[in-house]
Image (cartoon, grey):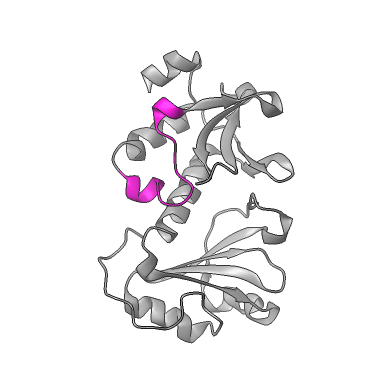
């Protein structure tokens, strides 16, 4: 991290440094599956929006997450994401963005225990009754307002992310085990992208 700061000529916020110290070098499984955390040596400043220190990238480089240069003096500054509509507020603190990163990267870390489907409005309204709404603030999806806000739900052994609140919004799900994933199918009937074929057992995941 000190080498990265020297190369950039910047002092990184405390919450960013702490997240890297906990996850950056050792837990690629929690940070590098879909929209990965950048290694310290790849941190860079995006010239738009008055300058943004970028620490995460969409897997094809279509979006970036970062902290405005003018906010670097804060211990836990807000995070912005580059969307189709330009740079927009993502989450109000880096510490929250670390939580979101780990949740999202865990969700997509093993295709055997992941699935997704589009939900009609009546099923979307039922999700808070069927699962616990996670205490993470709503946040935007970089792809556009039609897939926002993003909300998380959970139950023992189950992790769910709903992208948007409109009719036919996408629900992404992860089971800790095959049985957990099958239980989601039984609870939320839908046209699941990966079908209902039997899935191989897998090691438990870290949520």
Q: Is residue 102 above or below residue 129?
A: above
Farthest residue toward the front? 60
Q: At 55% from the left edge and 41% from the top edge, which residue is drawn?
A: 61
What is the quadrant of the N terminus in the image? Answer: top left
Instruction: Name the side, left or right, on which 204 lies relative to 121.
Output: left
Q: At 63% from the left edge and 80% from the top edge, which residue is drawn?
A: 123
Quarter of the image for residue 176 reads bottom left
Q: Is residue 83 above or below residue 70?
A: below
Q: Position of residue 182 (x, y in %)?
A: 40, 81
Q: At 35% from the left edge and 69% from the top edge, which residue is drawn?
A: 112
Q: At 58% from the left edge and 39% from the top edge, which residue is drawn?
A: 64
Q: Tell me where the magenta segment starts and ends, as one range.
A: 27-42
Q: Position of residue 56 (x, y in %)?
A: 50, 39
How many circles with numbers are drawn on the protein? 0
Instruction: Name the side, left or right, on which 167 lies relative to 116.
Output: right
Q: Position of residue 90 (x, y in %)?
A: 62, 44
Quarter of the image for residue 2 reads top left
Res 153 visible:
yes
Asked whether 141 falls inside the magenta stretch, the response is no
Instruction: Name the side, left or right, on which 160 lies relative to 69.
Output: left
Q: Is residue 175 above or below residue 9?
A: below
Q: Position of residue 117 (x, y in %)?
A: 56, 74
């Amino acid at each position: 991290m000190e080498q990265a700061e020297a190369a950039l000529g910047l002092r990184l916020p405390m919450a960013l440094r702490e997240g890297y110290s906990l996850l950056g070098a050792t837990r690629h499984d929690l940070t590098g599956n879909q929209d990965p955390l950048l290694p310290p040596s790849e941190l860079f400043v995006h010239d738009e929006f008055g300058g943004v220190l970028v620490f995460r990238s969409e897997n094809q480089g279509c979006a970036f997450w970062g902290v405005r240069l003018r906010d670097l003096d804060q211990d836990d500054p807000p995070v912005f994401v580059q969307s189709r509509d330009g740079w927009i507020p993502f989450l109000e603190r880096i510490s929250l963005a670390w939580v979101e990163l780990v949740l999202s990267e865990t969700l997509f870390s093993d295709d055997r225990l992941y699935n997704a489907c589009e939900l009609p409005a009546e099923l979307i309204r039922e999700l808070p009754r069927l699962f616990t709404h996670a205490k993470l603030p709503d946040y935007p999806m970089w792809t556009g307002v039609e897939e926002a806000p993003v909300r998380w739900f959970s139950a023992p052994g189950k992790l769910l992310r709903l992208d948007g609140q409109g009719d036919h919004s996408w629900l992404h799900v992860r089971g800790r085990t095959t049985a957990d994933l099958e239980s989601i199918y039984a609870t939320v009937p839908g046209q699941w992208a990966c079908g209902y074929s039997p899935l191989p057992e897998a090691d438990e995941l870290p949520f």
